[in-house]
Image: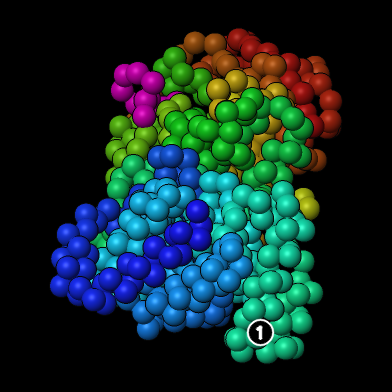
Amino acid sequence: MRLRWGLALVAVLWSGAAARDGVDRWIAATQMPPLTVETSDEVLDRTGNLLRAYTVADGRWRMGLNGAPVDPLFTQMLLAYEDKRFFEHRGVDPRAVARAAGQAIMAGKVVSGASTLTMQVARLLEDGPTGTLSGKLRQVRLALALERHLSKDDILALYFERAPYGGNTEGVRAASLAWFGKDPARLTGAEAALLVALPQSPETRRPDRFPDRARAARDRVIAHVEAQGVLTPDLARIARLDPVPRTRRPIPQLAPHLADRVRGEGPGPDGALRTTLDAGVQSRLEDLARRAVADHGAGRLSIAIVAADHRNGEVVASVGSAGYDADGRQGFVDMTRALRSPGSTLKPLIYAMAFDDGLAHPETLIDDSPVAFGSYAPQNFDGAYRGPVTVAEALRLSLNIPVVALASEIGPARIFSTLERAGAEPRLPAGAPGLAIALGGLGVTPEGLTALYAGLASGGQSVQLTHRPDSVDGVPGPLISREAAWQVGHILTTLPPPPNAPRIRLAYKTGTSYGHRDTWAVGFDGRYVVTVWMGRADGTPVPGAFGADMAAPILFEAFSRVTPETRPLGPPPPGTLMVSHDALPAPLREFRSRNAVFSAIKGQPELAFPPDGATVEVAGGPLAVKIRDGRPPFTVLANGAPVLVASHGREAMLDLPAPGHVSLSVIDSQGRSARAQITLR
């Protein structure tokens, strides 16, 4: 049967020469199959590197070249081995047909093939039968028609795109990624030879299943192209020494969550799915995310990391979870877009707004004492109170009462509005914003928090985050003054790095939400801002988790993987008030509510600070005591012994032994008294 095929091809060839017009009409009437085929969607990073690819509808990896180069060595070896007169014939090689037919007649069987690359492309386009005479004739006819409609480069491109390479892999680009982990722009002699050999028998030569057959086929290609002068003897010898790959490499799947989003958004103006991400940074942060959750055991802990350039808002990395899996961690959930309580991470914005409003200065004294704002009575995270502290120290220590006092003066609605203008996209559980938002009583996403801190880092101007280079840039607007932004950033840079973290200098803040459900760390330098969230995707608590212990070390490691060297924030703007507490204007030396009024003293005295049951940090220093109501002069007793006598002031600093339990009593001029049991440490 094969002998008759060869003779039939010779007959077609010579009949075409004898009746050119009839053959021309026969070729012109060829019904052409579709020349385009579905190829994998590819999401690219900022420089065109592949982040993630998707299989086509039938589950195959079929990746277009998209203008990407193929190593000329591969093309030379392919033509030398498969079709050395490719650029001379018009789809069918008469010399090859004659040779194959002659050999078949002499041997009584097929000795060599006469299929050109164009004929192979014809077979790939139709995926039709070639085991029958009609099938072979159809392949010849289509090859001749292709040569009339397409250039030689176009035909080569079709082969590069559709040649089978085993399993669900089609095309030289997908094959090069699967077997060598790289695009085919630069191939070794051994790699190019293997890619030439595989399409001849893609299943029985698969290196992962039949490495010996794959190697033998590759070496035959090497020997053939060496004889043709494509490879020198030395290069051929080196190529034979290379091992064949024993496993398939995974097609890149970086930034799977963001890639899904970009794919849903559709291609940009150039038809590509481009992003602002950096594939190298993304890969390093994904490795860090996997290690971070692994360090905390096999539980349900998840993680999100967002890194952006705050100068232009471009996202350089987006890690939605530690793994894109439907596992116990719910890794398929993109936590960069999940609403979570930000804990204390909103405090820097509130302090910056207070600086702008003239309510406070970093050196202003503010009272860290129990206080009630109507029915809302915030407490510090550790249950202790420190009395008068500077605003800068209150921010460094992340004290709750001072920031709520400032938020009360600024107004929760205004804070919420500023968060919206910053691009944080805050969400309230219900109703209007209240003072609880100062301590995380709302929802933001890691992306939203990154946008807020990008605004702080960029001199108080809002920054629109973007993950597409073709997106429309937003118009930045003022959030806070440059001076306030610098003051807050300067305070945050004085926080030491976490233990065992890279010793780099960042302006950073940590946060822990109520019930230990969310841990945060977000920081910036002169160029980048990075946010780290850790918790459980389903919102259940993580007992004992704190932002400073869990998320902060990851923040510093993440920063060191984003940039090899952090950049300073720069000098203070010209209008920044850089003075000590004593040199402040009188209204800024101590924070007082603008709504405070002095009323007549009446009723029995009360220890406003420290309250009953309080634990107070004194660190060997004096204890601040504040008296409310009652009539002076006052006497204060500690464990029954007088420590203050006939005082007309309502505030005093007492030297008391510490640590230990103390029973404080205050007696006014009318003999009325109040008592508090406290602990000093």
Whole-percent x, y for residue 622 in the image: 73, 38
Q: Judge by depth and name the residue closer to the eye, 524 or 81.
A: 81
Q: Judge by depth and name the residue closer to the eye, 372 or 338.
A: 338
Whole-percent x, y for residue 90 in the image: 32, 76
Q: Is residue 617 above or below residue 431?
A: below
| Residue 50 visible (yes or no) | no
Q: Is residue 655 above or below residue 567?
A: above
- Dot 1: within a 10 Å radius of its alpha carbon, few (fewer than 14), some, or many (20 or more) residues? some
Q: Is residue 20 above or below residue 588?
A: below
Task: Name the residue located 77 percent from the left edge and 23 percent from the top edge.
Answer: 679
Residue position for label 1: 226
Q: How is the image coloured?
A: rainbow
**89 relative to 233 in the view: left or right:** left
Whole-percent x, y for residue 450 in the image: 45, 48
| Residue 295 visible (yes or no) | yes
* Image quarter of the C terminus: top right
Magenta stretch, main secondary structure, is: loop
Q: Is residue 372 above or below residue 508?
A: above
Please state the total of marks drawn on the protein image: 1
Task: Name the residue located 30 percent from the left edge and 61 percent from the top edge.
Answer: 142
Q: Judge by depth and name the residue closer to the eye, 562 or 342.
A: 562
Is residue 434 inside the magenta stretch?
Answer: yes
Is residue 223 inside the magenta stretch?
Answer: no
Q: Which residues are magenta?
A: 427-437
Task: Name the residue located 44 percent from the left edge and 22 percent from the top edge.
Answer: 373
Task: Name the residue located 22 percent from the left edge and 58 percent from the top edge.
Answer: 30
Q: Secondary structure at mark 1?
A: helix
**666 relative to 276 in the view: left or right:** right
Whole-percent x, y for residue 522 in the image: 55, 48
**428 relative to 580 in the view: left or right:** left
Residue 116 picture quarter: bottom left
Amino acid of disc 1: Glu
